[in-house]
Image (spheres, grey):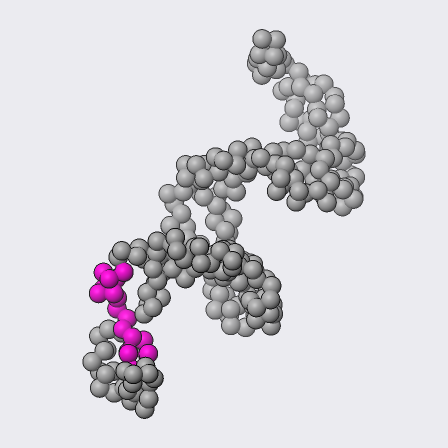
Amino acid sequence: MLRIYRDVHLAEECKSWRCPRCRRSISRVQKDVHYSKCRSWKCTRCLQVMLYHQQDTHAKECKFWKCNRCSKPKILYEQRDVHLAEECKLWKCGRCLESKIPREHKDEHLINCKVWRCQRCRTIIPSEQRGKLLKECEFWKCNNCAITIPRKQQEKHLAEECKFWKCGRCSKAKIPCEQRNMHLVEECKFWKCGRCSRAKIPREQRGIHLEKCRFWACSRCHKPRILYRQRHKHLQECEIWRCYHCDMKILLDQKDLHLKECPFIKCYKCCTSIL
């Protein structure tokens, strides 16, 4: 009960305010004026108070980190990954920037979140305007090197400038192009399903996933995420046709012309295509 009265007093009745930096008590109406003139500064990581002109030097030397999910300060930098993986039970939405959300409510929050953040220009807008912004956004983000550039420079960047590659299995980006084969053969421990497009599947669980996967991928147009029970319907509607003689993929309306001109014949005994 006393705690309730305290909160009411601080929120409504009390006319004074204490600066968290210099601990000086002043009138609440002078709060903004005092903030602009206060010569003290408080580090949000280690909670140390110092003179305002020392903040840049301290920011480089501070050995602590503050979690942006649960707002816990004074965490040593070397313990940051341990805190995020094991200790912190909360999550921060990257769209509306709301923090202290229980992890088990993450999916529910993303469904109901009314805000969306563009990954290209970082603009925060209402969710219903997402499609419009994606069409009008003047920026483009490279999946390989994660750099954001003007949209008109996209083709030049991919053809000449970008020297990196992104793995479609483990989603690791910024891999030098010359290390691509080494990453796929030696480093990457994951597998990507060509049916449902799900990535980051451990290689040893590939067989288990294929048994449970409910999707099918067309071998003609390579369209994934087709429900297995709808595969026959898709094959009837697919606009791509695959020649059974040369295995060439062509448009369905060019099928008759291709059969007349195809120089190959497939042996029905050994399934070898021969001229």
Question: In the image, is residue 241 part of the stretch drawn in magenta?
Answer: yes
Residue sitting at x 39%, y 55%: 211
Residue sitting at x 61%, y 8%: 2
Q: Position of residue 120 (x, y in %)?
A: 50, 53
Q: Is residue 53 above or below residue 250?
A: above
Q: Residue furthest bottom?
A: 275
Name the image quarter holding residue 257: bottom left
Quadrant assignment for the C terminus: bottom left
Q: Is residue 256 above or below residue 195?
A: below
**Closer to the camera in the image, 59 or 240:** 240
Q: Position of residue 42 (x, y in %)?
A: 73, 32
Q: Is residue 107 left or right of residue 88?
A: left
**Closer to the camera in the image, 211 or 274:** 211
Q: Is residue 242 visible in this depiction of the protein?
A: yes
Q: Position of residue 34 (x, y in %)?
A: 69, 26
Q: Residue furthest left?
A: 256
Q: What is the magenta range?
A: 231-249
Question: In the image, is residue 268 part of the stretch drawn in magenta?
Answer: no
**Closer to the camera in the image, 195 or 70:** 195
Q: Is residue 249 left or right of residue 26?
A: left
Q: Is residue 98 above or below residue 229?
A: above
Residue sitting at x 20%, y 80%: 256
